[in-house]
């Protein structure tokens, strides 16, 4: 029975002791009104953002290079199937399957062109052979004529000078005709060669396309270029890729294999706050899935161009935060609460935000002094979620109210 009495005695006593301990933090209870004792101490101006864990460096799995060749005229392909996000893959393992319908269509069209160009090339080669054979035969006939004219010229030495001149003229004329035939043959050979070469070029072009289309069909089964954990790529608005989406040559990323040896938190800061932060600013990072540990980091990158993404009313800038610690418990895409330390001040007068009031552009507090309550004008400075810096108007150990006192409309301003 005495134990029970002692128990009921110590519980109220403990409550009273806890209430007294609140004096250490500068507030005491007086009825329903609370008074705060002004103190000087450290102040932190911070900015809170949501982020996501990722690897600083990552291997990006893109549309295969062969498919991205613009000569194939394949500008986008639909995702037909995807390995589940977070899957650990080895080099060469399957990651995604692309819909090959557009490749098959382009390949069929090219096959028709290839067949036509093959026929044109064969016709060009046959035509060239026929024409050049005919010209070579004509050249051979002129060789016989030239030999005959030469024989007549040699025999003309026994004839009159006039007859000799006549045979000389005939011989020279045959030589000129033969030279012309040779030039005509060479010109025709070059002409037919150029014509055949052009047709052959077009045939080779379509033949190369045919090989590329066949390779593209094989590459529709996308494989991992190295070992790692598969994380889906994101669109411009931040939404992750999923089955049925199209991947284009302008935005070819399908997935990433992040290097988790160096971790970052990717976050977004609204344009109204972006001028407050700088590269090198310290960051305290809480992981939603690991609430009992705080990680530290530093801002390593701030993008130069803002973007519009769902969930924000204004443009935002992507900010990269390097984590100083690493751990096996940290996984890609874990949600983070990032507290960016914008400014640290060692010794300043601060008060709770609930103690600061304002009217007509003037800021004031309710000051308890000499047994009375006064309104006291102050000049506030920076503020965070809990406190406001007071640049002038208050002294250390001043007593101020954390809420509006009773009969506040009758309270006068303190002029001291």
Image (tube, helix red, strand yellow):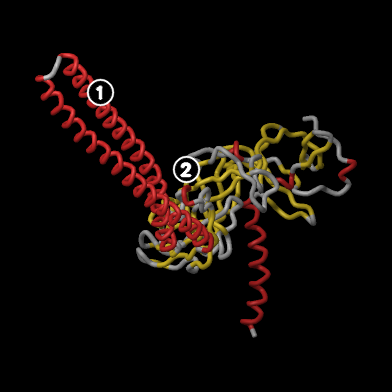
Number of the label disc, if any, that sits on residue 173: 1
Residue at 74% x, 47% y is: 354
- Does 48 appear above or below 148? below
- Does 364 appear above or below 3? above
Quadrant that contains the N terminus = bottom right
Residue 47 x/y as whole percent? 60, 46
Residue at 41% x, 67% y is: 94
Residue 108 x/y as whole percent? 49, 60
Residue 86 x/y as whole percent? 47, 66
Residues at marks 2 and 1, CA–CA distance in whole angstroms:
89 Å
Disc 1 residue crowd, few under 14, some 14–19, many 20+, Cα 10 Å = some
Query: Residue pushed farthest bottom?
Result: 1
Asked if one can make out residue 38 in the rendered structure from this viewpoint, the answer is: no
Number of the label disc, if any, that sits on residue 300: 2
Quadrant that contains the C terminus = top right
| Foreground tag (2 vs 1) | 1
Q: Along the line of sight, which residue is nearer the eye, 236 or 201? A: 201
Residue 209 x/y as whole percent? 42, 53
Residue at 22% x, 38% y is: 140
Asked if one can make out residue 393 in the rendered structure from this viewpoint, the answer is: yes
* Res 389 quadrant in image: top right
Query: Residue pushed farthest top?
Result: 161
Residue at 58% x, 39% y is: 305
Q: Along the line of sight, which residue is nearer the eye, 281 or 210? A: 210
Q: Along the line of sight, which residue is nearer the eye, 192 or 291? A: 192
């Amino acid at each position: 029975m005495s134990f029970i009495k002692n128990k009921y005695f110590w519980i109220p006593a403990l409550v009273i002791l806890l209430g007294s301990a609140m004096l250490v933090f500068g507030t005491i209870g007086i009825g329903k009104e609370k008074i705060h004792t002004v103190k000087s101490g450290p102040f932190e101006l911070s900015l809170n953002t949501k982020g996501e864990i990722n690897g600083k460096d990552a291997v990006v799995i893109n549309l295969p290079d062969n498919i991205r060749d613009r000569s194939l005229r394949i500008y986008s392909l639909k995702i037909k199937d995807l390995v589940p996000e977070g899957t650990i893959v080895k080099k060469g393992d399957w990651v995604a399957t692309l819909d090959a319908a557009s490749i098959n269509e382009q390949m069929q069209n090219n096959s028709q062109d290839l067949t036509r160009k093959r026929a044109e090339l064969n016709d060009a080669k046959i035509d060239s052979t026929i024409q050049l054979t005919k010209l070579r035969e004509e050249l051979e006939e002129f060789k016989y004529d030239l030999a005959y004219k030469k024989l007549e010229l040699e025999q003309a030495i026994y004839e009159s000078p006039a007859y000799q001149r006549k045979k000389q003229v005939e011989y020279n004329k045959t030589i000129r005709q033969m030279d012309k035939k040779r030039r005509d043959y060479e010109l025709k050979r070059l002409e037919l060669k150029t014509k055949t070469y052009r047709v052959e070029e077009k045939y080779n072009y379509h033949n190369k396309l045919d090989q590329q289309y066949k390779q593209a069909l094989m590459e529709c089964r996308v494989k991992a270029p190295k070992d790692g954990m598969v994380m889906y790529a994101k669109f411009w608005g931040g939404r992750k890729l999923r089955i049925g989406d199209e991947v284009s040559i302008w935005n070819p990323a399908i997935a990433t294999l992040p290097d988790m040896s160096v971790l970052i938190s990717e976050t977004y800061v609204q344009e109204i706050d972006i001028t407050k932060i700088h590269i090198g600013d310290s960051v305290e990072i809480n992981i939603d899935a690991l609430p009992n540990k705080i990680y530290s980091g530093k801002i390593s990158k701030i993008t130069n161009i803002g973007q519009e993404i769902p969930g924000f009313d204004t443009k935002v800038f992507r900010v990269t935060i390097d984590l100083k610690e690493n751990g096996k418990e940290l996984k890609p895409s874990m949600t983070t609460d990032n507290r960016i330390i914008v400014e640290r001040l060692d010794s300043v007068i601060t008060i709770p935000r609930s103690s600061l009031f304002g009217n007509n552009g003037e800021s004031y507090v309710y000051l308890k002094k000499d047994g009375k309550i006064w309104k006291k004008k102050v000049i506030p400075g920076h503020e965070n979620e809990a406190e406001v810096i007071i640049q002038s108007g208050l002294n250390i150990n001043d007593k101020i109210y954390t809420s509006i006192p009773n009969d506040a409309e009758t309270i006068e301003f303190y002029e001291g």
